[in-house]
Amino acid sequence: MALDYSEKVMDHFSNPRNVGEIENPDGVGEAGNPKCGDIMKIYLRVRDNVIEDVRFKTFGCASAIASSSMATEMIKGKTVDEAWDLTNRAVADALDGLPPIKMHCSVLAEEAIHRALNDYRSKHGLEVLPIEEFDHEHDHCSV
Ligand code: FES
């Protein structure tokens, strides 16, 4: 069955932004999706509390790659606190929606970004923040 992807999903999947790695990143985070085994890794370059550069590597489906691409675009130039507030729902909305059975794929980006931000925070003497447990069965946060 072909899924009904938005033009934005197809654009970010075919031409993903910010793919790659950052050497000696200020923060790095990884998230895996227990539903399918896909993995996303994110690298941050932070200057004066602002995300100056961000790169990702995603071994996953079209929705995961498009979500990673859009999420990196959305946190670039933001402060580390602003970036923390990015939700998978906001990423999916910015992509003009994801098919309901693909919403769980967008969670990879949110989780990997949170882990990368916490890595940055722990290296800079900042409080490490709790990462919300995601309900992968029902595609929403359980808290
Ligand atoms: Fe694995 Fe989409 S099916 S992240």
Image: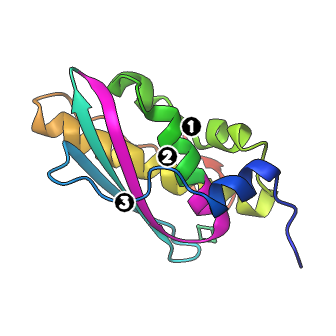
In this rendering, is residue 94 above or below 14?
above
Residue kind at label 2, given as amino acid type: Glu
Compared to residue 132, the image places residue 52 above or below, namely above
Label 3, on which residue? 20
Q: What residue type is labelled 3?
A: Gly
Please give the range of residues in magenta.
Answer: 49-66
Is residue 4 at all visible to an observer of this figure?
yes
Q: Judge the density around disc 3: few (<14), some (14-19), many (≥20) Cα neighbours within 10 Å.
A: some
Label 2, ligand 1: CB separation under 8 Å: no
- 16 and 84: which one is in front? 16
**Residue at image x 40%, y 56%?**
56
- Report the residue at 20% width, 34% height from top: 121
Q: Label 1 amino acid?
A: Thr
Q: Does the residue labelled 1 lie within 8 Å of ligand 1?
A: no
Q: Which comes before the other along the chain, label 2 or label 3?
A: 3
Q: Where is residue 134 in the image (x, y as percent from the top left)?
A: 54, 52
Q: Residue 87: which numbered mark, if any?
A: 1
Q: Residue at x 30, y 58 (%)?
A: 21
Query: Magenta stretch containing residue 60, yes or no?
Result: yes
Residue contact between numbered discs 1 and 2, judged by CB atoms under 8 Å: yes
Is 101 within the magenta? no
> Mark 2 or mark 3, which is nearer to you?
3
Q: Can residue 105 be seen in this view?
A: no
Q: In this view, does 130 lie above or below 67?
A: above
Which quadrant of the structure image shows residue 137? Answer: bottom right
What kind of element bears circle 3?
loop
Q: Quadrant of residue 130?
A: top left
Going from the N terminus, do you reach mark 1 or mark 2 first? 1
Checking the image for residue 110, the label placed there is 2
